[in-house]
Image: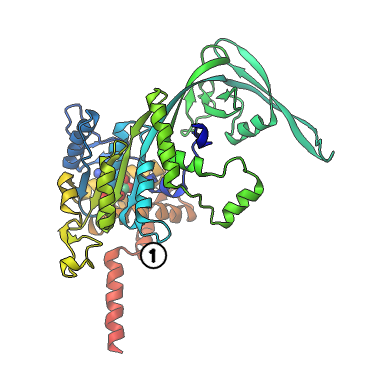
Amino acid sequence: ASGSGTIITQPPPPAATRESRIATHSHIKGLGLADDGTAMESSQGFVGQRMAREALGLHLSLLRQGRHSGRPVLLVGPPGTGKTALAVALSQELGSKVPFCGMVGSEVYSGEVKKTEVLGSCFRRAIGLRIKETKEVYEGEVTELTPSEAENPLSGYGKTISHVIVGLKTVKGTKQLRLDPSVYEAIQKERVVVGDVIYIEANTGAVKRVGRSDAYASEYDLEAEEYVPLPKGDVHKRKELVQDVTLHDLDMANARPQGGQDIMSVMGQLVKGGRTEVTDKLRREINKVVDRYIEQGVAELVPGVLFIDEVHMLDMECFTYLNRALESPMSPYVVFASNRGITTIRGTEYDGGYGGEGIRSPHGIPVDLLDRCMIVKTEPYARGEIRTILETRCRVEGIQVAPAALDRLADEGEKSSLRYALQLLTPSSIVARTAGRTEVSLEDVAQLEDLFLDTKRSTLVLKDLDANTKRY
Ligand code: ADP
């Protein structure tokens, strides 16, 4: 399809692993800054860490003025001090549909894929493309959804869907459509029920559920539900559709075997490990089409945020790649994080020229890249801040915790780490529920501390073990 100069722009479903990595930051909605740029004590899910938030706020205004010119931010601070949360907040401040990609430096050593390939795909996950197209659609609130069955024409046994009747309503009028079984499939995939607002693309039959009609708002009060007004205008109309995808989505959608979506090709893919190959050639072709879309005003680039944690795990080859990628006009905003001080830059150890010692540099980053970074530090949290963060997470996860239990968790957070305290939340709620209680008690937390160690205690265990084995 790339030969004809068009590409598939329907994004494939997102990968579950990367999604879940961001899930622990779902309470973070932004940097929580006042109009004058000062950080509020607790706002938009953010608590404390005010200097870092204000620094990122300033950086954000440079980005908005288009004056970042490839300057990454480097966040330095101990684990669990909100470095990832800050990067997530930065992307949210840039806009709700701005992509965010988080990775850890060590991810590049997968063995199967080239290091720069891993980096490259993360870069493309962090670059968005907003595509605007005017399309002919049928849009409205679903008033009727009736599939019609018929005898199976092939075997004569069983029933198949012959067509489906869909009633759509707008402020202006109603329309009844008789549609193909394939559209019915699409309707089912989107889990459309009567009372939902949907649109159907006239040419492709693609179905999109917009949300639940707000006429039903009082009936079902699920918090997850998004209510939308009854569409205006006619059911059948031309509508500007805005689609947000990442360059990585486009790579994946177009790397799929095309045309041959039959069972054999799907099986073949499974046998090969289900990996589809995105070649540099494919990326170049996609870039070409993207460039043309931009020129024609059909699409615009939306740079997102690429967060690289434990940046000291990257090696010289990766840093060389990064330096080049940051210069590209298609670059996301990059945020590095590290909790290391002066350390050897990976990949320089065996280089004869450095006496086998390797080059040592702050945070294991080569100085030329370091020079371009805006460095921001994060501070360990005080007990009160840890308590507030825990409280916030409880609210988001719908966990009720007794004040005494929360105090105990806050103590744990201060003693070992915020991460450890946060990790105890979900299991302690399960322990409570199993015991038939709705609220997590002090005992539940105490029980879990015995079951799961923090790193201080786990290293102690091994020290004791060492001492004992030496004795015998
Ligand atoms: P780091 O990247 O520095 O190791 P994280 O950002 O992963 O730390 O923080 C650990 C957890 O604590 C995450 O769930 C994060 O959302 C939350 N968190 C960290 N700092 C704050 C803060 N200042 N306010 C609210 N939540 C925070």
Q: Position of residue 344 (x, y in %)?
A: 19, 62
Quarter the C terminus occupies? bottom left
Q: Secondary structure at mark 1?
A: helix
The reply to whether residue 229 is in sight is: no
- Please say if 82 is above or below 286: below
| Identity of the residue drawn at 57% across and 52% down | 269
Given the image, on which type of amino acid does mark 1 rest? Leu
Q: Position of residue 1 (x, y in %)?
A: 54, 36
Q: Position of residue 254 (x, y in %)?
A: 50, 40
Left or right, 292 with respect to 9, comes to left
| Identity of the residue drawn at 37% across and 63% down | 452
Of 67 and 179, which appears nearest the observer?
Answer: 67
Decide if ligand 1 comes within 8 Å of the CB at mark 1.
no
| Identity of the residue drawn at 31% across and 63% down | 454
**Residue beneath disc 1:** 451
- Please say if 457 is above or below 400: below
Left or right, 366 with respect to 409, comes to left
Left or right, 142 with respect to 346, comes to right
Of 66 and 279, which appears nearest the observer?
Answer: 279
Of 122 and 287, which appears nearest the observer?
Answer: 287
Near mark 1 (Cα within 10 A), the count class, few <14, some 14-19 or many ≥20, is few
The reply to whether residue 427 is in sight is: yes
Which residue, as the protein is rendered here, is positioned at the far top? 172
Which residue, as the protein is rendered here, is positioned at the far bottom? 472
Q: Quadrant of residue 354?
A: bottom left
| Identity of the residue drawn at 59% across and 11% down | 173
Q: Position of residue 205 (x, y in %)?
A: 61, 27
Of 30 and 374, which appears nearest the observer?
Answer: 374
